[in-house]
Image (cartoon, helix red, strand yellow):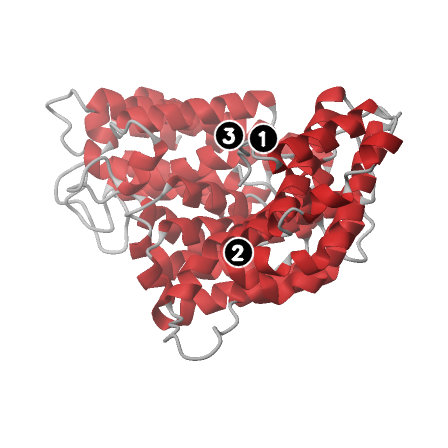
């Protein structure tokens, strides 16, 4: 057998011939194993299992100086052959195409991953032993070919996914930990971008390995590839990310443009990471920021609360970049911004929306838009008024997140646009008093702390409304104390009167 001959035969000098990877018996043994993993024989389970068993024995029985020999012979060295074997093992353990991924298939993938992970642990153990060996200086060359495929395998199977099991995740995490130890990296981020300024890092190598599987025709053939790309991207931050911008934007846009909501969310998160970690000047170059904006903006038409959540977070961080390209010279009205466009669409969607999860998601981000626009929020005053009044009328469940955020929005709106508030005094006063009465009489399962928070926020809004209207609220509420019997309502009105009479107020 090739395995037995590999154990006994030493490579002869000058025996290399063009077109061969490694002419030694050891090289032939690895070549045969590689053929079993990548050729037509790979479809035969018995041949494949035998090849994996032989590979494990071969790694165990081979000394490190022979395992990493031949680094000086380009395209024929043992280290490059080992790199090809590592790639083949990573592909062998990869999960099947999404539409073919049934439960029994996932179980088989987890078993394969466990088996391959144990082989990688043996291989990395040899590299670790070679680091202290004076007779094996080629271990760095071997590691350069092995690190990429092993990293892709480890990330694929260490995340909690349908194709993994507790055992396969445990082995994959051990592989990743040993890989970091062998490469002398303190973290995955250090492994990718380099532990110091002089070290190049392996992010470009990983992107090169992922690239063939990240085009529009192939990225769904392996359901793990998008997660490996996304997770890897999240590990690289400023100032290392911008140099890879041309290689990370296309896959991120491709994933976000899918019809499945899960992929849309994953892609938008990748784009958000790019926005946060790439300088604005690089994003504005070649109109990249506009491309990002339009790709993300279109997702606002998909009524999925998880997607809307990540989209709004990304847009709020993209606005400062886009506004750097806009210059207002002070003559005439300020031009409308991308923030205006997004807020207008959000308010259009909020008015008729009846699904609580979407209402909460929209309301959660409304204060950030008012802060962003400041006085320019007056452009949206009428629609904001309708949304605020409509949302204050609807019970939002025990946590009352939507109504609390709407009250926060109202406070910010009155602070930024106070000259326009007095003409809306009656409408806003009625809405706030109705809310206070509803909360005070609430017999639902709303916790007392939430009720107290609602009453406090509504009271703060009344105080601000009184300041904006030059004390008119105090006059309109003067007779209410005598006719109202609810102690909670009376307490709120008294707070408004006390602050209006000169007591300091922290909300302005």
Residue name at image x 70 percent, y 63 percent: 382
Residue 97, given in percent of the width and then of the height, sits at 63, 48
Please name the residue that numbered disc 1 is placed on.
160
Camera-near label (2 vs 1) is 2
On the image, the x and y values in percent for residue 438 come to 85, 35
Q: Residue 158 shows which numbered tag?
A: 3
Task: Decide which of 376, 338 is in the foreground and name it.
Answer: 376
Inspect this view and state whether residue 76 appears.
yes
In primary-sequence order, the first of circles 3 and 2 is 3
Badge 3: residue crowd in 10 Å (few <14, some 14–19, many ≥20)? many
Q: Please indicate whether residue 361 sits to the left or right of residue 297 in the image.
A: right
* Helix, strand or loop for disc 2: helix
Tag 3 and tag 1, C-beta contact below 8 Å: no
Label drawn at residue 138: none
Q: Is residue 278 above or below residue 396?
A: below
Dots 3, 2 in contact, CB < 8 A: no
Tag 1's secondary structure? loop
Quick one: which residue is furthest to the left in this view?
A: 134
Q: Nearer the viewer, residue 382 or 213?
A: 382
For marks 3 and 2, give the CA distance.
Answer: 31 Å
Q: Residue at x 23, y 33 (%)?
A: 68
Task: Give neighbour class at mark 2: few <14, some 14-19, many 20+ (Cα, 10 Å).
Answer: many
Instruction: Residue under label 2, please give it.
Output: 315
Q: Viewed as shown, does residue 185 lie left or right of 119? A: left
């Amino acid at each position: 057998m090739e395995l037995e001959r590999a154990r006994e035969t030493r490579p002869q000098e000058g025996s290399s011939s063009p077109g061969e990877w490694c002419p030694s018996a050891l090289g032939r043994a690895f070549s045969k194993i590689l053929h079993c993993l990548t050729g037509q024989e790979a479809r035969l389970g018995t041949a494949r299992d035998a090849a994996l068993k032989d590979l494990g024995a071969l790694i165990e029985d081979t000394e490190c100086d022979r395992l990493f020999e031949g680094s000086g012979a380009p395209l024929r060295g043992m280290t490059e052959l080992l790199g090809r074997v590592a790639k083949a093992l990573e592909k062998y353990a990869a999960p099947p195409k999404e539409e073919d991924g049934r439960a029994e298939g996932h179980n088989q993938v987890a078993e394969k991953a466990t088996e391959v992970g144990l082989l990688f642990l043996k291989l990395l153990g040899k590299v670790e032993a070679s680091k202290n060996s004076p007779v094996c200086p080629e271990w760095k060359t071997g590691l350069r070919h092995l690190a990429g495929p092993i990293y892709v395998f480890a990330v694929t199977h260490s995340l909690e996914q349908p194709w993994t099991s507790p055992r396969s995740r445990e082995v994959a995490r051990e592989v990743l930990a040993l890989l970091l130890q062998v490469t002398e990296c303190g973290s995955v981020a250090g492994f990718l971008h380099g532990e110091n300024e002089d070290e190049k890092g392996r992010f470009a190598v990983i992107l090169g390995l992922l690239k063939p599987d990240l085009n529009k025709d192939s990225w769904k053939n392996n359901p793990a590839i998008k997660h490996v790309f996304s997770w890897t991207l999240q590990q690289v931050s400023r100032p290392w990310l911008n140099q890879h911008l041309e290689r990370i934007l296309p896959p991120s846009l491709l994933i976000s443009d899918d019809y499945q909501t899960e992929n849309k969310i994953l892609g938008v998160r990748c784009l958000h990471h790019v926005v946060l970690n790439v300088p604005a000047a690089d994003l504005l170059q070649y109109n990249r920021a506009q491309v990002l904006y339009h790709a993300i903006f279109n997702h606002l038409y998909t009524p999925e609360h998880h997607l809307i959540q990540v989209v709004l977070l990304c847009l709020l961080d993209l606005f400062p970049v886009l506004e750097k390209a806009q210059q207002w010279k002070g003559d005439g009205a300020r031009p409308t911004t991308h923030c205006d466009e997004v807020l207008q669409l959000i308010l259009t969607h909020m008015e008729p929306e009846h699904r609580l999860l979407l209402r909460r998601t929209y309301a959660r981000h409304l204060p950030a838009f008012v802060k962003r626009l400041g006085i320019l929020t007056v452009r949206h005053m009428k629609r904001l008024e309708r949304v605020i009044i409509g949302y204050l009328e609807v019970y939002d469940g025990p946590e009352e997140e939507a109504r609390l955020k709407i009250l926060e929005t109202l406070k910010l709106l009155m602070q930024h646009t106070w000259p326009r508030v007095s003409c809306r005094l009656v409408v806003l006063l009625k809405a706030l008093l109705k809310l206070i009465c509803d909360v005070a009489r609430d017999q639902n399962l709303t916790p007392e702390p939430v009720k107290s928070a609602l009453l406090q926020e509504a009271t703060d809004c009344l105080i601000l409304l009184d300041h904006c209207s030059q004390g008119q609220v105090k006059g309109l509420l003067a007779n209410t104390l005598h006719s109202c019997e609810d102690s909670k309502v009376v307490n709120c009105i008294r707070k408004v009167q006390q602050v209006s009479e000169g007591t300091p107020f922290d909300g302005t």
